[in-house]
Every structure is written in structure tokens, then in C-alpha cells.
Image: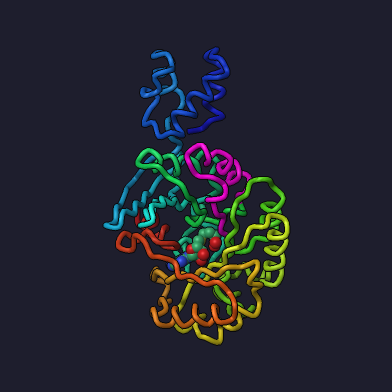
Amino acid sequence: MDLDLLERTLTELGEPAYRLRQVWQWTAAGADSYQEMTNLPQALRGALTAAVPFSTLTVQSEARAADGTVKVLMRTADGRPLEAVLMRYRDGRHSLCLSSQSGCPLTCTFCATGQMRFGRNLSAWEILDQALYFRRLTPVDHCVFMGMGEPLMNLDAVLAACQRLPDLGISSRHTAISTVGWIPGIDRLAAQPLPLRLALSLHAASAELRSTLMPVNDRYPLPDVLAACERFYARKRRRVFVEYVMLAGVNDSVGQARELAAILDPTIFKVNLIPYNPTGTGLQGSAPGAIAAFAAELERLGLSATVRLTRGREIAAACGQLAAGAVAA
Ligand code: SAH
């Protein structure tokens, strides 16, 4: 819902200021349409239905996995594709994975989004409408910006959306922004007041390998990125999650675990190892034994390391696969 358009429309209709708040309260609580908003006059509900689209996005397709994961492919009003995912965990968490851009200008070699054409930044309302779609299905409490795009290249819109996520039930402490290491964005995130979490996609400790996997490493080299994360920690006192996607024979040896441990301060960083979802790039995911050995070596060297639970595999809902459906569509 474009709340700027809503506000202008309410003003033009001569409505009192509190109407905006009323409409947003219903919407954030998961209402399906203006018609449900029983404290608005019937005529106003009709006028809003005609003038302000209930969502800025239209759903093109939806896939549901046996584990409760729901993935939607959506289009913006100008036809740009994007995807968003709801993950239900056994501990009761309902976590959303949101996109910040349609496509992505960075070209990480292992990532499906990196292989598609960049469209544009999404607006705050387009980001929020992904979350609202799922809020209409179920209560939600966690959110990660790990869908399409680089959130720190679209930080104004991401922050504007994050300001409103608590109204849907997702606190800033339960919201994580994931980045390739876009340094100006990390510093801006540290300087703004919301207690958002930072996650860094690291993937290789050596400069040469990291630049091969993530060309952005030439622009923002890892040592500078880690220094920015340390500034973030100094300011926010929130530990930074390191994401490390496990690629067979590429970055998954025990020696590479040692290289990783050597550059990370365990008081600041926690490592999350990500089983790779093959996306037709030629790269293969590491075997479970290799992931376990890598994690054990990190733990031995004093770092906290977890292995990400895989959700929604059969509907290609996992990270980095989100673009596949959109390209085919
Ligand atoms: N641009 C941001 C956010 C989007 S990607 C970033 O790079 O952090 C979210 C995470 O999914 C990143 O850690 C990314 O490396 C990972 N990812 C990408 N493709 C993947 C794949 N095919 N399998 C597993 N993880 C993948």
C-alpha cells in the first residue's frame, strides 16, 4: 500500500488526519481489503478501493512446500519481478525473507539473482507489501533482507520499510540486513537509530577467491569491510552474522576454515554456514561431512558457528534461488 498516495487521497477527500492511522492499523494487522475496515464510513471504503490499490504488488504465482514454506513471485505495477518467502520453523518462528531490489547489480557468480538483469530499486511500499502479503496469511515475527538485491544499495527505502515492520509484529531486533559488504551502507546503518541486525556475506577469506566469487570485493576489499563491521559493533553492540555459503572444493576445506577464523574476532562475529542450493551455475554444494568439519574447526578456534536450516528446497525457495522462477516466468 502506497501510504504517500493514501495520505494525499485522504487529504483530497477532506478526511481527518486520523483516518491514515486507522487504515494503516487495519492493514498492518492483516486486513484483506478496505471493506474490512469497519470504523471507516462505507463511502470512504469504496473511494479508497477505487483510488489507492490495496497493494503495490500483484501476485503472479505462489508455491507451498511440505515444511510450511511459502514462496511468492510478485510483480511491481511496472512489471518488475521479485520474490519473497515465508519460513515456518519448528520452534514457532515465522520468518520472512524480503527482496530490496528487482534483480541485483552485483554479479556474485554462485547466485541466481546475480545472473539476471538488474531492474531497479524497490520502493519502501513495495518492500512492505511483500511483508503484508504474508501477514494476511499468518502472524509473523522475524525478517531477513536476503531475497533479491543488495539492501544497502537501497537503504533509504529499506529503512523506511523497517520503521513500519514493528506494526506487523516484526521488531527491529528481529530484522537482519544482509550485505555483500557495501561499506557506505554499513556505516549508515550503524549511524541510524533502529537496533537492526547486520549480516555479512563473506564466503571466502582470501582476497583472490573472494573476488572471483564476489566481484564487489575489488571495490570494497574484505579487510575494509571487516573494519566497517567492527565500527558497526562498536556503535550498536550487536554481533554481526557472517554468512558463508559452502561450495564443494572451492571454499570448504579445513584450511580455509582456519583462514576464516584468523580474520574474525569471536566477540564480534558469529558464523552461519549456508548449504549451497545449486542454481545451474556449475557450482556444487559441500557434502554434509565437509560442512560439519568446517564448523568444528571454527568452533575449535573459538568462533561460534551454526549451519543454516534448509527450508522450502523442493519449491526452490532457498536463498539465491529466488530469481530462477522470475526469469522463467
Ligand atoms: N545482497 C545481499 C542479500 C541477498 S543474498 C547479500 O549478498 O548478502 C542473501 C544470502 O544468500 C547471501 O549470503 C548469499 O550469498 C546467499 N546465497 C546466494 N545464492 C545462494 C545459493 N544458491 N545457495 C545458498 N545461498 C545463497
Residue 11 falls in image quadrant:
top right
Main SS, magenta region, reads helix
Question: Is residue 157 located in the magenta-colored stretch of the structure?
Answer: yes
Residue at x 53% of width, y 57% of height: 104
In x, y percent, where is residue 265? 66, 72
In x, y percent, where is residue 137? 35, 41
Extreme bottom residue here?
Answer: 255
From the viewer's perspective, is 119 left or right of 155?
A: left
Residue 231 falls in image quadrant:
bottom right
Colouring: rainbow
Residue at x 43% of width, y 52% of height: 95
Question: Is residue 167 located in the magenta-colored stretch of the structure?
Answer: yes
Observer able to see residue 13:
yes
In x, y percent, where is residue 304? 55, 71
Observer able to see residue 114:
no
Above or below, 29 relative to 299: above
Above or below, 183 relative to 62: below
From the viewer's perspective, is 98 left or right of 229?
A: left
Chain part drawn in magenta: 154-178
Nearest the camera: 277 or 264?
264
From the viewer's perspective, is 246 left or right of 315?
A: right
Q: How many marks?
A: 0
Residue at x 53% of width, y 51% of height: 174
Residue at x 40% of width, y 34% of height: 30
